[in-house]
Image (cartoon, helix red, strand yellow):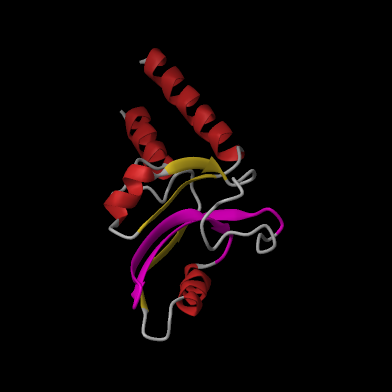
Amino acid sequence: MKNLQLRAIIALVILCIQQAQSLQCYVCLSAVSFDDCSTKAQKIDCDSPPPDLPFPFTTSTARNGNYACGKGSGSGSGGQVFMKSCIPKMTETEFCALLTAEVEADGKVDVCKVCNDNLCNASSTRVLTGALLLLTVGLIFRT
């Protein structure tokens, strides 16, 4: 039992260290689907983005170096667009407004999501979170 407790503590320490590092997000752009976008996705460090990072990231819009991961899709007369990217840290409402301002008059935004964990803009499926890990460890120690 002591070995299991030690492993749980080490896992929590690693989780805390990982969260202190620069935020990482998936970045991709597709005219087909989020699945297609995901097949082309690259992991990037938001603190040192490549120069060709897709909209809506620009260094002038970054707020004090604080970033989030964003995921959005929309359509217009030019077709559909699906994107994932680092974005300046903002609320989901602000991100939706930003995407809405970018679509044409006859276009619409279908998806606009913001998240703040590493690689959280991967897909619509849920991943193991720190809170779930803590709950699991708590249940182990309870016995």
Could you say where residue 78 lies in the image, as x and y percent from the top left? 35, 73
For the point 43% across and 55% down, the residue is 84
In the image, which residues are magenta?
A: 64-90
- Residue depicted at 45% across the width and 18% down the height: 6
Q: Nearer the viewer, residue 27 or 141?
A: 27
The residue furthest bottom is 105
Q: Residue at x 37, y 44 (%)?
A: 40
Overall secondary structure of the magenta section: strand
Taking depth in this image into account, of 47 and 120 the one nearest to the observer is 47
- Near-viewer residue (31 or 116): 31
Q: Is residue 1 above or below residue 27?
A: above
**Residue furthest out toward the top:** 3
Whether residue 124 is visible: no
Q: Quadrant of the C terminus?
A: top left
- Does the magenta segment cover residue 142? no
Image quadrant holding the N terminus, namely top left
For residue 77: magenta?
yes
Q: Left or right: 78 with respect to 26?
A: left
The x and y percentages for residue 72 are 40, 63
Residue 48 at what x, y percent from top left? 64, 43
Q: Is residue 83 visible from the viewing direction of this image?
A: yes
Q: Is residue 112 shown above or below 107?
A: above
Where is residue 128, by image quadrant?
top left
Pinpoint residue 36: horizontal percent, then vertical percent: 29, 50
